[in-house]
């Protein structure tokens, strides 16, 4: 493929994402919803103007990594430490409930008995797909609403990050049960090793940047080397520890979030993100969708799958949040914020296809879940926040 | 290839380009020189840490297109119209002299007679490779020096753009002499059609943007849609008119350069460029180099090739500039500014390889020319400008 062909794709994506983003905002929905819908419309589903290519996949990956790095940079570290233990609990519940829910759904739907048959593995795998929250869309939504740094916002993001890690661990366990060459112990050890690496390496890097920071305040070099560090952490996390690259990028952001220039770096990242990489990432979710293989026979299952996946997160995460002394509205926000599935669910599903634990026909159910959750959750979140606002306005009036 | 692998490459490029860029500046050389050297050092030539991949090629292409768009945006349209006829003359001389020079060099070196033999075509092709100036490195250098919008700067860039077009036309003629399926008349017609398209389409687009511009001053949408327009023009130029994508991008910039927000758009482009795409583009010139096939026997030819290519541009362009009433120093600047060869020379050489007019062993000579010219020209330009400054300081003192 000639290099210039990519220009057509990106030009179409940028214009479509901007138009639908503005349209979404006019309809009081977050812009990201518009961008995903733009991808659906220009993609193979409807107009077929742009198809997912290897290049766009990589651009989208850079996009999601930059978004996560930026979220890390904007983290309030004190708030994170305070919400950490809670986030861990919420993440665990947010993995367990969907895992059980998905397994039971498949068993009930196809009358699978719980004995260790091949079908039971498939049922467990259906639950596994449901476990991992996609934090990127939530991050963007919370940022647009202005609550990224709030207590609820930090809790959601920390919990979503942790639940990605647990989700990947569950995936490895489930596959490990079937294939003996993946060692489940290794997964745990890798995760522990990454945490140690991030703590030790992070401390050193922070000190280096700190020296930089004071001497070269607001210079390009701080932002550029920061971005390079983000990419390096993404690569190291995935390559050497088997941890998702987006987790590495988020950790890189957290390591740098206490710099004086962290907001300066974040602003540069935002410009890079909204000018090109962000729209490409969100539109690519829509581009991946191909509904041609969707038939009525699995439509029912897909609908049930989506409903269970959404409700399971609200119940699991919302319930634990309520126990952790969040009020009802905030608990709901956390549940809804954790509801979104995205690239990790796709990665898990892809893995399932390749090891034979997921039949191709169910892939569309996963995509439906991603689309429905990423369109609904921002809308519901916005609604829940508006209730808060109205209440506080009334309080002020009283 | 997994998506996360690109993170390693980009991280290494960003850090190396920044370090060598700063080093270059400390040595009073333009940063781009440092970035090209960084590519040479981390590339297959020396360390082998990063190899040219399809993804990096496309990222580099986006980089050069953004740089050209930005140069177009910063153009002073009145200055361009004033320098246009002169630029055309300079470009013609800048094509003719190297074309003849390169042909004579090959003929003299290998004792080729001017009868229409296969070898004579090869000689003409050697001249063809020398014709097209690479404007992107000059643009970046002039920007760093702060003379992008000066009369000399505008002349160089207009002439370089025009000479790219003439260079591609010469290439098509030379190939057309050998292969009958390429119609030389079509090339001329395409170029005329593109000029008409750019004038008519450009006027309409400008009016649309103008309405936008006033209503949504300093908003993201102006910058994003501007970038999309740049990509669209790059694509249309190359796909439908056979004109290089970078020319399309430059024209897109010129169309928008009279907007109130043109500087705002240019600033956003610059941030996108220096954060990632720019370093990737300049480093990729170094990455493309592989000196392993270089042997002593063609070293002599390569050196002569480089010397002729550099001097031919200075003589051709500098002489005409002097006739056009530029002073000696400014004429030299124009000659030196036109000296740089880059991606177009590579494209021409690649084309020559594929039609059998260039033997692979000469490819390294082309790469040597690119490296030497892109390292020397910025240094000489900087020196020539410093003479001006010293002279004006002395005048002030007097």
Image (cartoon, coloured by chain):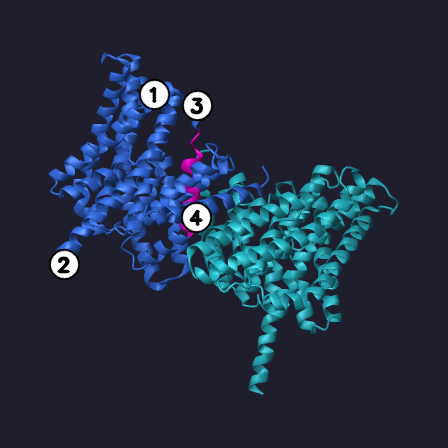
Chain colours: A cyan, B blue
Cα–Cα span, label 3 and label 2: 55 Å
User: Which dot, 2 or 4, sits closer to the camera?
Assistant: 2
Whether residue B154 is visible to the viewer of this picture, yes or no, is no
Q: Of the residues under marks 1 and 3, which one precedes in the sequence?
A: 1
Instruction: Residue at 68% x, 61% y: name it.
Output: A159
Q: Give the number of callouts.
A: 4
Whether residue A373 is visible to the viewer of this picture, yes or no, is yes
User: Which dot, 1 or 3, sits closer to the camera?
Assistant: 3
Which residue is the site of mark 4? B18
Which residue is the site of mark 1? B181
What kind of element bears circle 1?
Answer: loop
Label 1 marks a residue whose chain is B
Position in image of residue A173 (x %, y %):
77, 46
Q: Residues within 10 Å of mark 1 (few under 14, many from 20)?
A: few
Q: Quadrant of residue B378?
A: top left
Instruction: Residue at 47% x, 55% y: name it.
Output: A223
Number of the label disc, if any, that sits on residue B397 = 2
Q: Are marks 1 and 4 in contact (CB under 8 Å)?
A: no
Q: Of the residues under marks 4 and 3, which one precedes in the sequence?
A: 4
Residue B155 against residue A255 in the figure, above or below: above
Which residue is the site of mark 3? B293
| Foreground of the two, A70 or A326 | A70
Q: Residues within 10 Å of mark 4 (few under 14, many from 20)?
A: many
């Amino acid at each position: 493929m000639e290099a210039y062909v990519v220009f057509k794709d990106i030009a179409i994506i940028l214009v479509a994402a901007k138009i639908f983003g503005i349209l979404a905002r006019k309809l009081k929905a977050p812009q990201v919803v518009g961008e995903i819908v733009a991808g659906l419309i220009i993609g193979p589903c409807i107009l077929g103007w742009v198809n997912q290519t290897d290049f766009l996949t990589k651009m989208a990956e850079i996009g999601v990594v930059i978004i996560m790095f930026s979220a890390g940079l904007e983290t309030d570290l004190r708030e994170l430490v305070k919400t950490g233990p809670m986030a861990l609990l919420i993440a665990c519940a947010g993995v367990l409930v969907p895992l059980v829910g998905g397994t039971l759904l498949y068993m009930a739907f196809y009358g699978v008995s719980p004995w260790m048959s091949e079908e039971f593995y498939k049922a467990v795998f259906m639950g596994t797909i449901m476990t991992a929250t996609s934090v990127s869309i939530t991050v963007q939504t919370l940022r647009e609403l202005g609550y990224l740094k709030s207590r609820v916002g930090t809790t959601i993001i920390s919990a979503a990050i942790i639940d990605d890690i647990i989700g990947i661990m569950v995936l490895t366990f489930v596959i490990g049960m079937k294939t003996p060459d993946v060692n489940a112990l290794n997964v745990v050890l890798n995760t522990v090793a990454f945490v140690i690496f991030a703590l030790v390496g992070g401390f050193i890097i922070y000190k280096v940047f700190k020296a930089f920071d004071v001497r070269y305040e607001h210079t390009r070099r701080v932002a550029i080397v920061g971005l390079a560090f983000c990419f390096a952490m993404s690569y190291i996390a995935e390559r050497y520890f088997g941890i998702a690259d987006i987790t590495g990028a988020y950790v890189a952001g957290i390591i740098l979030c206490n710099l004086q220039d962290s907001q300066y770096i974040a602003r540069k990242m935002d410009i890079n993100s909204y000018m090109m990489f962000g729209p490409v990432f969100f539109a690519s979710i829509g581009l991946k969708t191909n509904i041609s293989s969707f038939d009525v026979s699995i439509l029912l299952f897909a609908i049930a799958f989506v409903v269970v996946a959404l409700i399971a997160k609200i119940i699991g995460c919302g319930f634990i949040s309520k126990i952790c002394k969040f009020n009802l509205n905030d608990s709901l926000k956390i549940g809804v914020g954790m509801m979104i599935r995205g690239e990790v669910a796709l990665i898990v599903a892809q893995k399932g296809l390749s090891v034979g634990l997921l039949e191709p026909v169910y892939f569309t159910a996963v995509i439906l879940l991603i689309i429905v959750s990423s369109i609904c959750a921002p809308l519901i979140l916005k609604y829940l926040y508006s209730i808060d606002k109205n209440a506080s306005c009334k309080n002020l009036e009283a």
